[in-house]
Image (cartoon, helix red, strand yellow):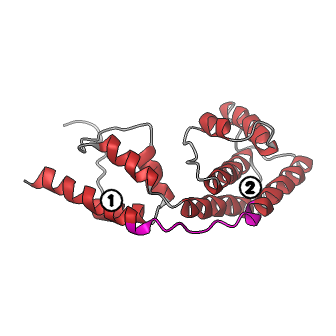
Amino acid sequence: MDGDFDFVSYDLDKMFGLLAKSNPTVLEWVRAHIVYFNAFPEWQGFRDGLLERIDYSALYHHYLSLAKGGMKVMQTADNFTYKKVFYSIRGLMSAELATQEQMPELLITDLFAQVNAIDPLRHWAEDYLEIKKQQKEKVQLPEAEQATILNLLEHKIEQLAEKSMQKADRRASLETYLTDYSRHLKQHYYQ
């Protein structure tokens, strides 16, 4: 056998444990439009049922934390790049959708379509996407632009903070759903 092979595996129980907490990263794996190999039985039905049971407050806090973390990093020396700003904006748009119990789309152009057309952050993100396509995403923003975008980001965070995101009482239902599917998978593969 010639060449490199990349084998990836994971613990199904661990993955389902993370999904029971509505872990956004694992949820993005489940929702990804690129699937290299998936032979799980009734996957689409499972996926749809999973998305009906997700705790949006977990998504909200995750995406808000990503945005705030990105903002903190970009305010250090030579880090105020288009890429950092873009990902902070994306996090804030996703957090806002979570407050409306809307699943943020993974494809960026689809995410833009979910956000109000007059939202100033959407306009900035669309402009920054064009810069990213030109492979200039690691370029520093001009100082005047830095202050403007920082104010917009902080204003959006304040708006989101006013929308108190209550934790949904879906955990038990989600855990039962995941346990049932886990048993189904194990019976399917181990019998």
- Could you say where residue 105 lies in the image, as x and y percent from the top left? 56, 42
The kind of residue tagged 2 is Asn
Q: Nearer the viewer, residue 130 or 24?
A: 24
Horizontal arrangement in the rendering, residue 61 relative to residue 118 (left or right) = left
Q: Quickly name the residue at label 1.
A: 177
- Bin the neighbour count of mark 1 within 10 Å (Cα to Cα): few under 14, some 14-19, many 20 and up: some
The kind of residue tagged 1 is Tyr
- Residue at the image position 89 percent from the left and 50 percent from the top: 148
Which of the two labelled residues, at mark 1 and mark 2, occupies the earlier sequence position? 2
Q: What's the magenta region?
A: 160-172
Q: Quickly name the residue at label 2.
A: 79
Q: Secondary structure at mark 2?
A: loop
Image quadrant assignment for residue 120: top right
Q: Secondary structure at mark 1?
A: helix
Residue 4 in sight in this render: yes
Q: Is residue 35 above or below residue 66?
A: above
